[in-house]
Image (cartoon, rainbow, N blue to C red):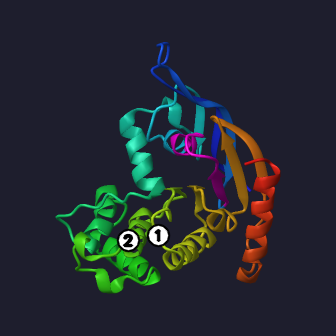
C-alpha cells in the first residue's frame, strides 16, 4: 500500500537554546499507510499529543520533515497548510471546540462550506448522511449545550469527515466517555477506516488501541516499541487482542 504520511527525524523543542529548553520529540521516524489504523500509546508527557500536532502541521516542528500525500508540510506556508488541513485532514480531539452560537448541523457543515469543494446542497446532504451514520440525526437543530459528551464526539466525527479527509487524527477521542459511549465511538471510527480513511489516534485506553492495526509506544519523546496487531476481523476477537496488548505493555515495562 502507498504511504500517506511520513515523518523523518522529526524533532520538537520548546524554548530552544534557553536554560528552560524542553526537548519533546527526538528524531521521530514514522510512516502511515493509506487506509491504516494506528494508535500512539505512552505515559503522559511522552510526546503523543505533540507528535499529532506536529505531524499534522498544526504546529511547526523544530527540525525534520513531514511528507503528506506528496506535500512536504514542513516547507509550506501557513496558508497552504490550512488548506490541506481543511480539505484533506480530519481532527477529533477530547476537548471538542464547537461554536455555541451555531446549531449542531451548522457546526458540521461549516468547514464544508469553507472548503468549497462542492455546492452547498451536496454538503448539506453529506452532513445528513454522516449524522444518520453516527445516529445523531435527531440532534440536527439542537444547540451545543443540549447534547451529551458522547453525542458531542459523534458531532466531532461528522465534522471531521465532512470534507472526505484522507486521514483522521484523534487525541484521546474517547478519554472523557463512559464504556458504552467509547464502544459506540470505536464502531464509528472502524466504519471510517473501512471507508478508506487512515486513522492516527493517541490514547491511554487498551480498548481503543486493541482495535488498531498497529500500536506505537512513545517514551520520553522517542518511539521505543511497536506492536503489529493486524486488522480487526471479528469483534469476537477483541477481548483476546486487549489481553495480548496488555500483556505486551507489561512485558515491555510500560
- Identify the magenta region: 36-51
In this view, the residue farthest toward the right is 251
| x, y percent for residue 85 | 43, 49
The answer to whether one can see residue 114 in this image is yes
Label 2, secondary structure: give it. helix
Is the Cβ of the residue at disc 2 closer than 8 Å to that at disc 1?
yes
Indicate yes or no whether the magenta region holds residue 67. no
Q: Residue shown at 54%/75% (left/top)?
A: 179
Tell me if residue 229 can be seen. Answer: no
Image location of residue 23, percent across then percent down: 56, 26
Q: Which disc is residue 166 wearing?
A: none
Q: Tell me, yes or no, whether the highlighted magenta stretch contains residue 50.
A: yes
Give residue 211's position: percent from left, percent from top: 68, 68
Q: Name the image quarter holding the N terminus.
A: bottom right
Residue nearest the viewer, comparing 133 with 174: 174
Query: Which image quadrant for residue 247?
Result: bottom right
Question: What residue appears at the point 45 percent right and 64 percent down from the top-left corner?
Answer: 176
Query: Which residue is disc 1 drawn over?
Result: 177
What is the CA distance from the residue labelled 2 to the residue labelled 1?
A: 7 Å
Position of residue 89 relative to residue 52, above or below, is below
Q: Nearer the viewer, residue 178 or 47?
A: 178
Dot placed on the residue nearer the N-terminal end, 2 or 1: 2
Left of 253 or right of it: where is 99?
left
Residue 149's label in the rendered image is 2
Q: Position of residue 66 (x, y in %)?
A: 58, 37
- Residue at horizontal 74%, vertical 76%? 239
Amino acid at each position: 500500500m502507498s504511504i500517506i504520511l511520513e515523518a523523518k527525524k522529526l524533532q520538537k523543542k520548546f524554548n530552544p537554546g534557553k536554560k528552560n529548553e524542553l526537548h519533546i520529540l527526538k528524531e521521530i521516524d514514522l510512516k502511515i499507510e493509506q487506509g491504516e489504523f494506528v494508535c500512539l500509546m505512552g505515559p503522559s508527557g511522552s510526546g503523543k499529543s505533540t507528535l499529532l500536532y506536529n505531524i499534522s502541521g498544526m504546529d511547526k516542528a523544530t527540525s525534520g520533515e513531514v511528507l503528506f500525500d506528496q506535500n512536504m508540510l514542513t516547507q509550506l506556508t501557513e496558508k497552504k497548510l490550512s488548506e490541506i488541513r481543511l480539505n484533506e485532514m480530519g481532527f477529533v480531539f477530547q476537548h471538542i471546540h464547537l461554536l455555541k452560537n451555531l446549531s449542531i448541523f451548522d457546526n458540521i457543515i461549516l468547514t464544508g462550506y469553507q472548503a468549497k469543494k462542492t455546492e452547498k446542497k451536496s454538503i448539506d446532504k453529506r452532513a445528513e448522511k454522516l449524522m444518520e451514520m453516527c445516529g445523531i440525526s435527531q440532534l440536527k437543530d439542537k444547540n451545543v449545550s443540549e447534547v451529551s459528551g458522547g453525542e458531542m464526539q459523534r458531532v466531532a466525527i461528522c465534522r471531521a469527515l465532512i470534507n472526505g479527509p484522507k486521514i483522521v487524527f484523534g487525541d484521546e477521542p474517547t478519554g472523557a466517555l463512559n464504556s458504552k459511549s467509547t464502544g459506540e465511538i470505536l464502531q464509528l471510527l472502524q466504519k471510517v477506516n473501512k471507508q478508506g480513511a487512515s486513522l492516527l489516534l493517541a490514547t491511554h485506553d487498551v480498548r481503543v488501541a486493541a482495535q488498531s492495526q498497529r500500536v506505537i509506544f512513545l517514551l520520553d519523546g522517542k518511539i521505543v516499541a511497536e506492536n503489529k496487531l493486524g486488522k480487526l476481523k471479528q469483534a469476537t476477537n477483541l477481548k483476546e487482542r486487549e489481553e495480548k496488548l496488555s500483556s505486551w505493555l507489561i512485558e515491555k515495562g510500560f
